[in-house]
Amino acid sequence: MHRVGSAGNTTGSTRPRKEKRLTYVLNDADDTKHCAGVNCLAVLKSSAAEGCDYLFTGSRDGTLKRWEVAEDAATCSATFESHVDWVNDVVLVGNNTLVSCSSDTTLKAWNCLSNGTCMWTLRQHTDYVTCLAAAEKNTNIVVSGGLGGEVFIWDLEAALAPVSKTADAGEDDCPNGINGSGNSLPITSLRTISSSNNISVHNTQSQGYTPVAAKGHKESVYALAMNDSGTLLVSGGTEKVVRIWDARSGSKTMKLRGHTDNIRALLLDSTGRFCLSGSSDSMIRLWDLGQQRCVHSYAVHTDSVWALASTPTFSHVYSGGKDFSLYLTDLATRESLLLCTKEHPILQLALHDDSIWVATTDSSVHRWPVEGRNPPKNFERGNSFLAGNLSFSRARASLERSTPVAVYKEPSLTIAGTPAIVQHEILNNRRHVLSKDTDGSVKLWEITRGAVIEDYGKVSFDEKKEELFEMVSIPAWFTVDTRLGSLSIHLETPQCFSAEMYSADLNIIGKPEDDKVNLARETLKGLLAHWSSKRKQRFGSQATANGEFPPGKDISTRSLTHSRIDLDGNHENDSIVYPPFEFSTVSPPSIITEGTQGGPWRKKITDLDGTEDEKDFPWWCLDCVLSYRLPPRENTKCSFYLHAYEGSAGQILTQGKLSAPRILRIHKVVNYVLEKMLLDKPLDGGIADGPLAPGFPGGQVQHPALGGDGSFRSGFKSWSKLKPSIEILCNNQVLSPDMSLATVKAYIWKKPEDLVLNYRVVQGSSAHKIEEKIVIYMLAQLELKGSGGGDPKLVHITSECVILLGVEGVMIRTIHRCCISGLSDWPGNMPAISGVDWQVSSLRSGIIQFFGCYVSLLQQVLRETKFWCVADRWSSTVKKNLTHKLTKLPRANIV
């Protein structure tokens, strides 16, 4: 079974502390439905003549729901969301208090008639809490049992009394700044404590109360039952024995043997004399506690018995289990009847007037008409059989094909759930997850905004996974599980901050194309956008000024020592949530996390009210969203060597090792090669101390063309449209320009050593083409110098033209494209212009003729693109410098 991991180091160990994680649970379906198996049921009958009855369901999706039940319909009127793992059992205490237990090790109490308010949380168990029992006539007593043999008897009034005494403490003493009665509605026999709707509160041990421990079980407990007065308790589990306790003192009174496998269900009659037990040995046993012996055994099922429900008089028992079947058995006559057969194992039963509610491992709940007020009427339908004394008698009957026919074929009412996700695959782009549910439907999720982007229907999961394969390598920045029937995305620091992408790849409009985007950081901003908005409404400018909390909301100085990277000083821009990270408010995800107090909690992102702080959130999460800082990260760079391809005439560009971001594209390596080969110097606007400068430790260098500063500046057109004359190879394989260094290392290089890349000039690139590129580069430099200082965007135009090698005609066309780049998309054929001969043979005269005829157009272009402040002096300056430079231009074959 899945274990709930410890959120932090609480044992005083000297090992590095494991930081608390943040999980968000995606929801694509109707929130009024369960999306995983239903473990428990409880029915609340209305005391008013015209009032409606309520059914409460607890699910493996971690939520409870309240249903208003009518004759032919059931409507979800509330969702109780606070548990962070499976809800395993639920009992009604008093008139309107619901107590639930969970695999998250907690018990929670709810005002069952509210809109989902968690009133308090009790923490005493150290492992899964699997079962509960309550006394019909003593509304203060609840018993909980769980793994590890733990059984605790809770006096709710005593447990809550110390807390109520401190309820008048200051606001800062409460986890969310809400006093003890802030969200509580009146309840019977219980005193409320502070709560912020769903966020759990103080550990009961810290308040001085400890429940009575019923010590004796050496192994896990799976079933509990109490008599009406709350004086007698029975328990069972993996020890295969039924233990009887004095519930007032927690002392053992007797132990009953007979079952040969785990005990999974127990019932006590109102007086506490008779006990029914259901076991994984497929047997139901009736025990007389006064005589301390088993008086009857019922071999009804062919597999494990997991659920029992008896009539008020304890004359008949309904049973269900792993064999998908619901049986009715007369305890006196041993006559049994198959009422219905389900498609899933039965987990829980609840009688409701003449019907019975059946919960299974499926997310739907069914109501069957079973004559609950008069069970003998069912036997009038025939097909009954006599229950045997030994389990093999039913198994043998089944093998002999004498299985009885079910009385009922269809339920009278079904509360439909949504299919649970049972299979998933994280795709290589680390943004999409492929899922398959219990109906066989395959969907593609974009986890950075929590939405389904493609529903493929009932197709082969494996074939669709192969179809969606991409040869990309992005660090694993999150993990996924489907334990709750949905996709749960787990973020842990610092690993979650390891993945970055260029804004162009995310199609973020208005953001420079080569800006790096940290996926976890932007996802957190999207998740907490509603919280941030509410926080600003509550605290105004104090909420995020300099990333500090408003007075009274202290955040630990730990965040300042653990977080050292301030990505952007522009906090206003940092608060923007970009479209690829916008989460739905119609089907919002739920957050599961914890802070410094109160333990784990769960809430929908739209239910956050802005009061939550470090007591509720992990410090690193707030540090990222409020202070715009990320923790130190590893493995964000990729080291590699760049050499000429064997047999190529290219010169050696570098003597040492290069370093660049993992996400750097190969087309930028092409840029670097061209610049070094043709110019032997970087583009203007690079790092001050220059690339490949001697004296870097270990010979490792960075270059602005390779993104040594983190990115290229904006202005490039899509590299998929470029036709480079330089090819980059790895392991003798030509690399695509849009591959990243990380992808090359993962799929082409496939070695732990530093990557080795080779470059070569494409065959057919003649000397005059390279000469043309030199002229373009010089033009750009002259334009910058002649203007008295220019916009860095021109460097992008230069770089683009340097690698635009698809021009087979004269130089003029390429120069023309260079000058108008970024202004408009001109057609490939050059316009007819008086005085310009597009087929001139002399390169120098053609360039000068071009400028002479196009000076007015160039001035307009420069003004509109704001490259220069003094556009009217541009043409004469360019002519003068151009003539000087071109007369000294070498004509040698550079290739």
Image: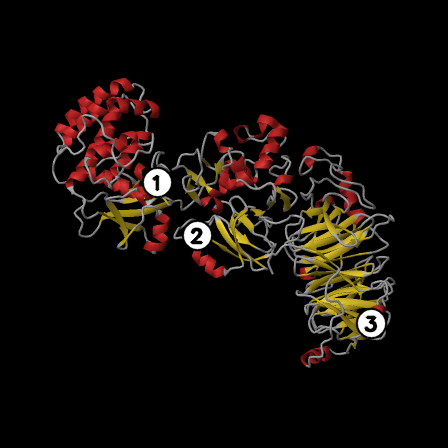
Query: Hey, what amino acid is under mark 2?
Result: Asn
Q: Is residue 486 visible?
A: yes
Residues at marks 2 and 3, CA–CA distance in whole angstroms: 59 Å
Under tag 2, what secondary structure?
loop
Q: Are marks 2 and 1 in contact (CB under 8 Å)?
A: no
Circle number at residue 428: 2
Q: Secondary structure at mark 1?
A: loop
User: Which of disc 3 and disc 2 is earlier in sequence?
Assistant: 3
- Residue 690 visible here: no
874 to the left or right of 523 = left
Q: Which residue is mark 3?
A: 379
Query: Do the numbered discs 3 and 1 sit on residues whose CB atoms are within 8 Å?
Result: no
Residue 828 on image: x %, y %: 27, 37
Assess disc 1: are there few (<14), some (14-19) or many (≥20) residues with their C-alpha within 10 Å of its C-alpha: few
| Side of 690 where 221 appears, left or right | right
Task: Look at mark 1 in the image and give the residue it sits on.
Answer: 718
Query: Marks 2/1: CA distance?
Result: 22 Å
- Residue 27 is situated, as x and y percent measured from the top left of the image, at 59, 48
* Label disc, if present, on residue 299 of the rendered structure: none
**On the picture, is 798 further left or further right than 175?**
left
